[in-house]
Amino acid sequence: MAATVIDGKAIAAELRAELARELEELKSQGARPGIATLLVGEDFGAGMYRGAVEKFCAEMGLGYRSETLPADAAERSVVEAVESLNRDPAVSGILPLRPFPPQVSDSVVINSISVDKDVDCFHPFNMGRLALGEPTFPPATPAACMEVLARYLRSEGRDPAEALEGAEVCVVGHSNTVGKPLALLLLNANATTTVAHVYTSNKGNLAKHTLAADYLVVAAGVPHLVGADLVKEGAVVLDVGINRVVLCPACGALNRGKKSPCRVCGAGLADAEAKTVGDADYEAVAQKAKAITPVPGGVGAVTNMMLARNTLRAARLELERR
Ligand code: NAD
C-alpha cells in the first residue's frame, strides 16, 4: 500500500495563517517583531541564506535588519555588532550566518547573543534548557519535525503526546543543529529515542536500529541513504535531507556533480538532469511506510515557520518585560 504523503507546504500554509494572526495581535500591543542576520565576509551559502531570510521576513510582515561585516573584521567588531543587535528593540531574533572567517570564533560570537534573542537555539544556555526540557526556542529544523509529526498524528485522529509516549523512534544523524536537538525534543516527549549516525553505519548496524523504529527521521545529508530495506513496514518516515544530485542519463544512478563520470556506469554527466532529493529513496520507501514527507515540500517547507514562531515568542517575552 502506498504511504500517505505528509504535505509540508500545506502545513506551512496553516502555520502562516496562524502566525499572521498572532503577529497582528502583537503589533496591536506595540511590539515590533523582527529578525536580524549577522554575516561576516562573503561566503556564498551564508549570503544566499541572508537573502532568503530577508525575503521571508518581507513575506511574513516581520521587520528585518542586516548586519554585514567585511571578511577581515576583527572578532571584537563582530561582538560589538551583536551587542548593537541585542540592544535594538526592533530586533527580536538574531541569526548568525556561518561560516565565519577563521579569526572569528563561532562560540565567542554565539555566546555574545542575548539568550532572549537566540531564536534558532545556538546559545549553550538555550541548548541546556532544551536538554532539561525547560521552555526555550527550539531550533527551527528539529521543531519543524515535531510540528509535522504532531499535525500528521492529529490528522489521523491521534493525540501526538499519547502517540509519542514510549514510541520507538530512530533519528539518523547526530549533528548539533538537527539530529541531537531533535533527539532531545523526542526524549522530552517521552519517546524511546535511538540516535544512529555515520559510525553506526560504519559498524554495519544502521538497519538494526532503523528497522525497529515506528517513527524514522533521517537527517544525514546522504542522498537515498535509506531504502525500503531499512524501513519497518508501516513506519512513519520524516526525511530532513536536502541533497542536490544529478541523475545519470544512462543508468539513473545519483551522482553528486556533473564533473566526474557516473560513479556506477562511467557515462558522461555533462547533460545530466539535476534535482533535489532527500536522504530516503522516496519511491521505494513510500511502498513500505505508512506515511512519508517528500523532498522538497516536506520538513524543509515548515522550517522557516518555526523560526517565525520563535521570533514572535521572543517579541512577546520582550513585551511582557516592559
Ligand atoms: P551534518 O553534515 O552536520 O550531519 C550529518 C549527520 O548525518 C551526522 O551526524 C553524521 O554522523 C550522519 N551521517 C552521515 N553519513 C551517514 C551514514 N552513512 N549513515 C548514518 N548517518 C550518517 O548535516 P545536518 O546539518 O545535520 O543536515 C543533515 C541534512 O539535513 C542535510 O541534507 C541538510 O541539507 C538537511 N537540512 C535540512 C533542513 C531543513 O530545513 N529541512 C535544515 C538543516 C539541514
Image (cartoon, rainbow, N blue to C red):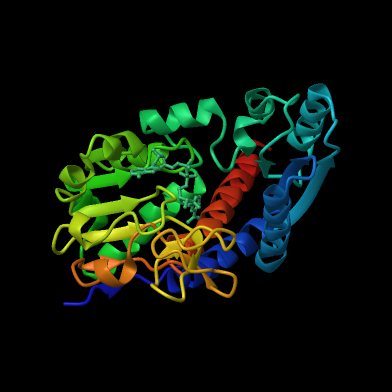
Which one is nearer the viewer's eye here, 264 or 112?
264
Residue 161 spot, x, y in % from top left = 24, 51
Height in image: 128 above or below 29? Answer: above
Height in image: 24 above or below 46? Answer: below
Height in image: 183 above or below 34? Answer: above
Which one is nearer the viewer's eye here, 119 or 286?
286
Residue 93 spot, x, y in % from top left = 66, 44
Q: Quadrant of the C terminus?
A: top right
Q: In which quarter of the image is the N terminus?
A: bottom left
The quadrant holding residue 181 is: top left
The answer to whether residue 264 shows anywhere in this view is: yes
Residue 254 spot, x, y in % from top left = 43, 64
On screen, residue 314 versus residue 296, left or right, reads right
The answer to whether residue 231 shows anywhere in this view is: no
Residue 150 spot, x, y in % from top left = 32, 58
Q: Which residue is drawn at 78% across and 24% down?
A: 75
